[in-house]
Image: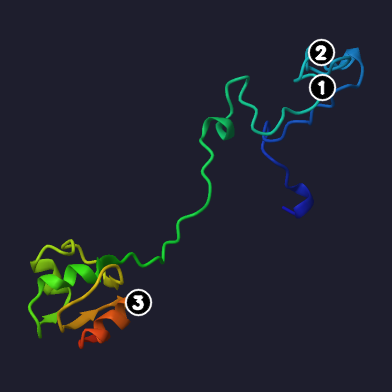
Amino acid sequence: MKLHHLKPAPGAHRKRTRVGRGTGSGKGKTSGRGSKGTYARNTLPRGFEGGQMPLQRRLPKLGGFVNRNRVEFSPVNVERLNAFESGAVVDPAALAARGLVRKRRAPVKILGRGELSTQLTVRAHAFSASARSKIEQAGGQAEVI
């Protein structure tokens, strides 16, 4: 047996249908596409769903994006720190114990609204510039954790 003796099994290969080659071929004139209409002409538009409202028009338009790396702080204003006695050390645990910050694991940021009348050592993850200056004007310390 040699290479030129090899041939595919009977029925394994079928001849390609040559459309538009005369009426005698059985696929002449309209070439099996019927008469007129979208299917007789060219291909369908991309995304065409037979007249049903297309997927890209059914879905809502959503603007913008969400930054997955955003750090969401739990804000606490300086005026709320007056609840602590003078000389106390205020940290996120102490704020949570007093109910000034929610007990979720978000970092705490001290903001500068209001006035501070007590001398405190405040430990937080972040401070606004005005909050830091108000804590230091009251004789306290602002420490970043």
Which label lies toward us, 3 or 2?
3
- The answer to whether marks 1 and 3 mark residues whose Cβ atoms lie closer than 8 Å is no
Instruction: Look at 84% across and 23% down and name the residue there.
Output: 19
Query: In the shown orientation, is residue 64 left or right of residue 71?
Result: right
Mark 3, residue position: 130
SS at mark 1 in the image: loop
Q: Is residue 86 left or right of residue 57?
A: left
Which residue in the protein does label 1 denote? 41
Q: Is residue 40 visible?
A: yes
Lower position in the chain sequence, tag 2 or tag 1: 2
Please tell me which residue is depicted at 88% across the width and 21% down the height of the picture: 20
The mark that comes first in sequence, 3 or 2, is: 2
Colour scheme in use = rainbow
> Residue 107 location, x and y as percent?
26, 71
Seen from the viewer's position, the closer of residues 121 and 46 is: 121
Q: Is residue 68 above or below residue 142?
A: above
Q: Is residue 47 above or below residue 115?
A: above
Q: Are marks 2 and 1 in contact (CB under 8 Å)?
A: yes
Along the line of sight, the residue nearer the viewer: 108 or 21: 108
Badge 3: residue crowd in 10 Å (few <14, some 14–19, many ≥20): some
Q: Residues within 10 Å of mark 1 (few under 14, many from 20)?
A: few
Tell me the distance, in whole angstroms, between the alpha carbons under discs 1 and 3: 71 Å
